[in-house]
Image: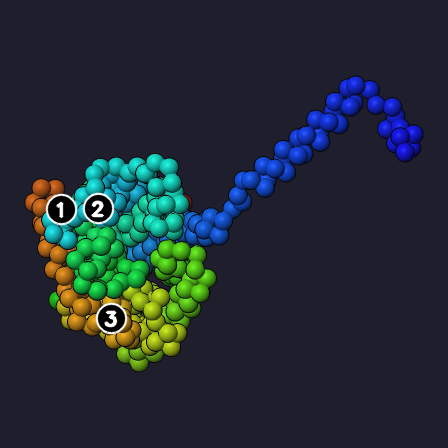
Amino acid sequence: MKDFLYGFIGKPTKATTFTILSLLLLGTFSTFAQEEAPGPTVADAIFTANNIWMLVATFLVFIMHLGFASLESGLTRAKNTTNILFKNVSIISIGILTYAIVGFNLMYPGDFSIGQYFGFAGFGIAAPEGAAGLIAYADGGYTYWTDFIFQAMFAATAATIVSGAVAERIKLSSFLVFATIFVAIVYTVAGSWKWGGGWLDAMGFYDFAGSTLVHSVGGWGALVGAIILGPRLGKYTKSGLKPIPGHSMPLAAIGMFLLWFGWYGFNGGSVLSADPELISLVFVTTSLAAAAGIIGAMVLSWIVTKKPDLSMILNGSLAGLVGITAGADVMTPMNSVIIGLIAGLIVVGSVIFFDKIAKIDDPVGAISVHLVCGIWGTLAVGIFAADFSFITQLIGVLAYGVFTVVCALILFLTIKLIMGLRVSQEEEYAGLDLGEHGMEAYPDFQQIAESGGSTMTMYSGSDEY
């Protein structure tokens, strides 16, 4: 046998003998270590899956800001496009930074210092050391950092809603001051009442992903801003209402699809885990409500205006999405269809009411979509979900309404007194792109005013084409 082995490896020297023994010994220790060291547990796997899904949902919510920018730009005039894009880019940065500085610890204070109405855990963010910030955080659901960045993406959304309603006539500096304080303090303190374990949470109020906490809060701010600012020049004249059409319906349609796409992260991420059953249900209810919202808006607007209105069905889809957001995880698929369909009908009626009866100028329909349909979606939880009280849901809606309106009034009136709110008539006629920024979104086009709106023709030097 020895001679047989030597025929393959040769007669071993001391060096080769030492190498073979070392390899055998290393293999033994390796096997022993594998037997002694425990591998990943089921809890580890769940923890990893939860974090991956929530981070995916985070960048889906981030994409929604591109949707807001596109929708708002498309539904307003070309001469204000740079201004609108500037605001939307600024809002996401303001939201993330203020949420890191004060917002996160206002919204999730841990212990409330004034009843269950207000608490503050301190400035800045810092994960607890070791496992406390990792697998031991949130009962092993996700890390501290995942929690922060997911919630930070929500924070700027409320101010983005306000942006659309006050578009085309508000001073950029005044809006940015409002947005900073609104996102940093108003949204976060209001959010703590439910998501931070405050008094409304203790009462049993339910808002899964923010029909009220995000959309209605932003919608109340939008309503106050639009009233204080007044309508755009040329909107309401002695001869009656003059529509001011947006400059790019393709851009608006792209914005709607981006928002719908991002809503899967907005609602799906709010499960706060990678639970396959619950996430898939939320995806289904979200999709059905959006689709039903389109149908509801399509039918009613076609009946009322005698024409199929694209802008109405774009807002119809968003109305359905806002409507289902409060109860996406507790609704049956068929109930989500009903909620979305009613939201689509409501948004058409609301747009017509604010435009023609109340004469509150909202260029993109933000008040109707986010405030009115946000209220509907929150109340729908008390109507369709047996475990929740309609009265409690109504109390929550009223509480957020009063708080946000008072705060928005104080902010807008103070800013108006100190800085002024509205651009000059000359700037508004020429467009905020030139008046506020000294640049144009479409420098190769000449804008020509037509019946309160604007159209564009090719421009080269002093020639028009």
Residue at mark 1 to residue at mark 3: CA–CA distance: 28 Å
Q: Which amino acid, mark 1?
A: Ser
Question: Residue sitting at 18 percent across and 43 percent down?
Answer: 120
Label 3: which residue? 388
Circle 1 residues within 10 Å: few <14, some 14–19, many ≥20? few
- Determine whether, in the image, residue 195 is placed left or right of residue 144: left
Q: Is residue 357 left or right of residue 373?
A: left
Q: Residue furthest bottom?
A: 303
Image coordinates of residue 66 in percent, x first then y, are: 37, 51
Q: Position of residue 40 (x, y in %)?
A: 51, 46
**Height in image: 92 above or below 70?**
above
How far is disc 2 from disc 3 in space, using C-alphas?
Answer: 26 Å
* Observer able to see residue 424: no
Marks 3 and 2: in contact by CB < 8 Å?
A: no
Residue drawn at (31%, 47%) of the image:
152
In the rendered view, would you say 160 is above or below 101? below
Residue assigned mark 1: 113
Classify 10 Å Cα crowding around label 3: few (below 14), some (14-19), many (20 and above): some
* Residue at (42, 62) in percent of width and height: 279
Q: Are marks 1 and 2 in contact (CB under 8 Å)?
A: yes
The residue at 37%/59% (across/down) is 271
Please state which amino acid type lies under the numbered disc 3. Phe
Q: Which residue is mark 2?
A: 109
